[in-house]
Amino acid sequence: MKSDKLTERITVRLSETDLEAVKKYAQYHRLDPSDVLRMGTVSFLRSQGALDIEEPKQGFYLIERGSVPAGSPIHEEESGGKRIQIPENMLPPNLRKDAYVLRVNGKSMEPDIPDGSYIIVVRKDPKPGDIVVGHVDGDGVTLKKYIMKKGIHLLRSINPHPRFRDIIPREKLEAQGVFHAIVPKA
């Protein structure tokens, strides 16, 4: 059982302080602590001799956190946890700890972001014109362009088809992250 051996090595080699730091980081970013161990803390843990995980041949890994609809906001189940290899030049090192991957479901952001694409999302505050993962009125999330028009926040599709209408929140729009790039197909 390789995972039991890995867990044992981490538990034995990390101090309580280090374990608490991993747990706090995971809680703050709404991640499972095991995902944190596979993400940003891997280099630290390896330098301490606590991990023996293969490095990507080129680039780095981000965790897939599930999918996001490019259409009407709906509740999507967070899933994933799968490690996605990202080319080194796609994301500056200072943004990696706040980044994750989502799979796009829907055609409202085509042709720029095709249905089925994997995208890199960075947790940061959006500016008008950014493409965001927006949580709308507690009704669910969607991937859209963030627009500020006459003091009103709205989300707009890139696809000009008339079936994709602007989304104007009744009460609240919360950006969960800003689109950074499409992950290239391997």
Image (cartoon, helix red, strand yellow):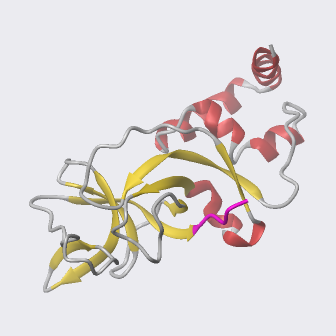
Work out whether 4 lies above or below 102.
Answer: above
Q: Is residue 110 magenta?
A: no
The quarter of the displayed image where residue 14 is located: top right
The quarter of the displayed image where residue 83 is located: top right
Left or right, 19 with reference to 174? right
Magenta span dominant secondary structure: loop
Left or right, 13 with reference to 162? right
Q: Residue at x 85, y 47 (%)?
A: 55
Residue 124, position in %: x, y?
45, 65
Q: Is residue 184 magenta?
A: yes
Work out whether 48 lies above or below 74.
Answer: above
**Front residue of 182 and 97:** 182
Work out whether 79 lies above or below 12.
Answer: below
Residue 118, position in %: x, y?
55, 58
Left or right, 170 with reference to 119? left
Residue segment shown in magenta = 182-186
User: Which quarter of the rendering shows the C terminus?
Assistant: bottom right
**Front residue of 100 and 7:** 100
Residue 21, position in %: x, y?
62, 36
**Residue lying at the far bottom of the rendered structure:** 150
Tag count in the figure? 0
Q: Residue at x 9, y 61 (%)?
A: 170
Q: Residue at x 67, y 62 (%)?
A: 185
